[in-house]
Amino acid sequence: MNQFVKLWVIVGLAFLALPLLVIVPLSFTSGHYMVYTPEMLALEPDAYSARWYSEVLHDRDWMLALRNSLIIGLSAAALSTVLGTLAALGLSRSGTPGRNVWTALILLPQIVPIVVTAGGIYSAFSDLNLIGTYAGVIIAHTVLAAPVAVITIRASLERFDWNLLAASSTLGAGPLLTFWKVTLPLIRPAIVAGAIFAFATSLDEVVVIQFIGSYDQKTVPIQMLIGLREHLSPAILAVASMLVCFALSILVLSELMRRRSEIYARKTTKT
Amino acid sequence: MTDDIIGRYENVSKFYGSMAVVKNLNLDIRRGEFLSLLGPSGSGKTTTLMMLAGLQSPSSGHIFLNGRPIETTPPHRRNIGVVFQNYALFPHMTIAENLAYPLKARRMARADIAQRVQRGLEMVKLQPLAQRRPTELSGGQQQRVALARALVFEPSIVLLDEPLGALDRQLRETMQLELKQLHRETGVTMVYVTHDQAEAMTMSDRVAVFNDGKLLQCAPPPEIYDRPTSAFVAEFVGESNRLSGAVAAVDEGGCTVTTDAGIAIRTRPQPGLQRGQAVFVYLRPERILVGGAAAACENRHEAPIADAIFLGDHTRLRIELPGNRDFTIKQNFFGETRPPDLGDRIVFGWTAEAPQVVPV
Ligand SMILES: Nc1ncnc2c1ncn2[C@@H]1O[C@H](COP(=O)(O)OP(=O)(O)O)[C@@H](O)[C@H]1O
Ligand SMILES: [Mg+2]
């Protein structure tokens, strides 16, 4: 029975990982098409090259998309993290009135179908002249990424010892000093993790941006969609492989952060 | 307000919703004293303490510190040290950094800070652990750090909320002595919350007994022990034999209570008693005299012993007195006087000083 379950787990994981196993080697093709050539299957060195990677790095469209992804992603992540930290602190305090209502409101963008959110943002932003601007896309991505930051940071606050803040105030530190010297250092790992997830959320986002972004704000995934529609080249595979690498490093990084924040939490709860 | 009153609660009440947890509290804290707030869990001691620290605000009434009302002063400007029950040490700072924290918050000069931290560490004998983190310390050591941190900035009052609650008994007793010594050395006013009556008795200059949000009595330990003014205080502090009855006579020389079982008890004059009033009479087991010593007592009885338990420093005798079948006598039998056997009839009694009469 146990063996049987194990087998299914392996099959399931293989099924999930298969696209990666197919895509990553194929991105190193020296040919023009997204297919495994007989030479590649024979593992001939000539059949492999990094040409599509260099192609991507020298292509103006791809580089614009990469720049946009970084600008929009980093800005949205920064905004989401600041707002998310404040929101998480407020929502975790037992004294905050209407916590449940606020929590539901803040998490709403996570629950509502993305197209609905996109439509709403579109109609709101057209009145504000934010359509086709960086500011518009960044704000929209912040709306989507902030809940992710809130969830991550709130999780670490579950075990936060609020007595430490009371102690800090009786020791003569005002609210601001307490925040910098006590709150922030203790939840920093969770904040960093929240920022990473917020960045990943923005990087992944392809629906809202199609509503409110213009050609100038196209991000990497948008460029991939364009690529798939216009000229199906292995360059897309190269980009996809890079994104996979990026996603993997985020995974590793956030796991490290989670562990650190767990250690902090243990330290604060142990008496 | 006189100079020797450092803090004052004036008609202070605290409600959570419609539940009153502190009820019309009037209490003075004297400069330099060790005041204990004693009461069962949920009696409002922590709330009382936290209102002084500024971490809770009174629903009504006023709190004064050094003669000035402090409602509008935020906690970080009150200059009151607090030792929390779980210590609340900053886990991301070393012990030295924890001690330096209140000094840095006050923007003291670096050299001053170093010197004071050093003195603070010496005070609680923790110099070797200055660079450790709180989690690397034992409970008792963490306790000392919390204490030093609450003292290092020379607060006008130090508040301690059941600081020894988490320690084992032996460590508790050591820490009680250390705390008492620190109080003597620093001369700082300490307000100490505890639910352990023995602890309150041994450490305090005065004990304030709370129950159900009400301050019942505030007095030095001997007075709390010997002259409780309410049934709750008499029963919460120490051990007592209770007899219920009614006041039969009040005169110049004292008063007489007749218990429900018909025993007449003569006591010293006690204010506020009226003829016919229903009362409890409390008798401490060790205030009851046995044998020859009882000969001169105003109240004297003879009865068989129902139980005798030898406990080393004393023997507990149980007498089935009418109205209280667990009437206990603590007696130290020593030398010639042989502990009586079960069923032996003994003579016992008490002076008019011993009984404490309180309204039901
Ligand atoms: N923040 C709060 N909200 C509601 N009730 C509270 C709060 N804090 C304390 N209480 C209640 O007030 C009462 C007194 O609490 P507390 O002052 O902590 O008592 P003590 O320290 O004597 O055990 C308790 O019944 C407690 O449940
Ligand atoms: Mg308490």
Image: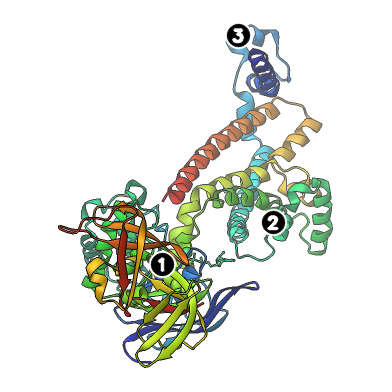
Q: In this view, does A141 lie to the left or right of B182?
A: right
- Residue A90 lies in what quarter of the image? bottom right
The numbered mark 3 sits on a residue in which chain? A
Q: Name the residue under label 3.
A: A44
Instruction: Name the residue type under label 3.
Output: Glu
- Residue A221 lies in what quarter of the image? top right
**Circle on res. B356:** none
Percent of width and height locating residue B93: 36, 54
Tell me the mark number nearer the camera, choosing from 3 and 2: 2
Percent of width and height locating residue B350: 31, 73
**Circle on res. A103:** 2
Residue B18 higher or lower than B91, as above or below: below
Q: Is residue B54 left or right of residue A19?
A: left
Q: Which of B43 and B124 is in front in this view?
A: B43
Residue B52 higher or lower than A256, as above or below: below
Tell me the mark number nearer the camera, choosing from 3 and 1: 1
Q: Which residue is drawn at 51% across and 68% down?
A: B43
Cβ of mark 1 under 8 Å from ligand 1: the answer is no
Q: Which residue is drawn at 60% across and 19% down?
A: A49
Label 2 SS: helix
Instruction: Name the residue type under label 1.
Output: Asn
Percent of width and height locating residue B333: 22, 59
The numbered mark 1 sits on a residue in which chain? B
Rounded to the nearest whole Å, what is the CA distance between mark 3 and mark 1?
100 Å
Q: Which residue is drawn at 25% across and 73% down?
A: B295
Residue B290 higher or lower than A144, as above or below: below
Q: Name the residue under label 1.
A: B241
Q: Which residue is drawn at 34% across and 82% down?
A: B30
